[in-house]
Image (cartoon, rainbow, N blue to C red):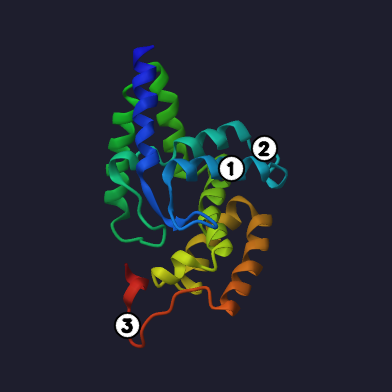
Amino acid sequence: MNEVVNFVLELERLKSVTRKTRVVGNDRFENSAEHSWQIAMLAAALAPHAPREVDMTRVIGMLLVHDVGEIDTGDTLVYIEEGAAERKAAERAAVERIFGLLPAPQAAPFIALWQEFEDGGTPEARFAHAADRAMPALLNLANAGQSWVEHGITHERVVRRIGPPIEAGCPALWAWMRVQLDEALARGWFGTLPSGSQGAEHL
């Protein structure tokens, strides 16, 4: 019991990991614990649009564990692609440390879920990735493009980065989102780069 309680109290630190997107209707930034809860709920609500063979229990489990490593590593803007291998190695070490607070037989299934999400090879992992990539964009769409504008993220970059995983995991969600993103572009809800600058496109 002590190990379980110590583990759960360690998870408390995820509430202090600040992300880059603000809470809708509020000036504060969301945290990674809120993000994990919200995308688990998003996936559950999207269940009618999931491929027939998808085990939603595993999907929700992946989404609840996928960012636990950020307790040690912090959050990185999804559009930053450089250094991804190093960040994932650090996150894997963090996941092993945090779940290692539990007895080994309990830790192993959590770590396996985390790795399945990272590998992205199962229908469940692809559906989980779709929810994970969609949620920050949904918040931006509700916030007039807040983090896109603040970080100079262009429409092209958003579509390139989130489109393939969302379409692969939940085609119906991407079909809806693509229309919303195009409308957001018309409203000026994306960042722009200075003329002749590579800027945020190569963060």
**3 vs 1, front mark:** 3
Q: What kind of residue is marked 1?
A: Pro
The spot of residue 173 in percent (x, y) is 65, 56
Q: Which mark is residue 123?
A: 1
Residue that lies at the very extreme toward the top in this rendered image: 1
Is disc 1 placed on a helix, strand or loop? Answer: helix
Mark 3 or mark 2, earlier in chain: 2
Residue that lies at the very extreme toward the front in this rendered image: 26
Q: Disc 3 and disc 1: Cα gap in Å?
A: 39 Å
Which residue carries the number 2 mark? 53
Q: Where does the N terminus fall, quadrant-wise? A: top left
Residue 33 lies in quadrant: top left
The spot of residue 94 in percent (x, y) is 29, 36
Q: What kind of residue is marked 3?
A: Ser
Which residue carries the number 3 mark? 197
The spot of residue 147 in percent (x, y) is 44, 64
Q: Is residue 13 left or right of residue 62?
A: left
Residue 186 lies in quadrant: bottom right
Residue at x-position 55% and y-position 46% = 126
Residue at x-position 45% and y-position 35% = 65
Q: Which mark is residue 37?
A: none
Mark 1 and mark 2 in contact? Answer it, CB < 8 Å: yes
Mark 3 and mark 2 in contact? Answer it, CB < 8 Å: no
Q: What kind of residue is marked 2?
A: Glu
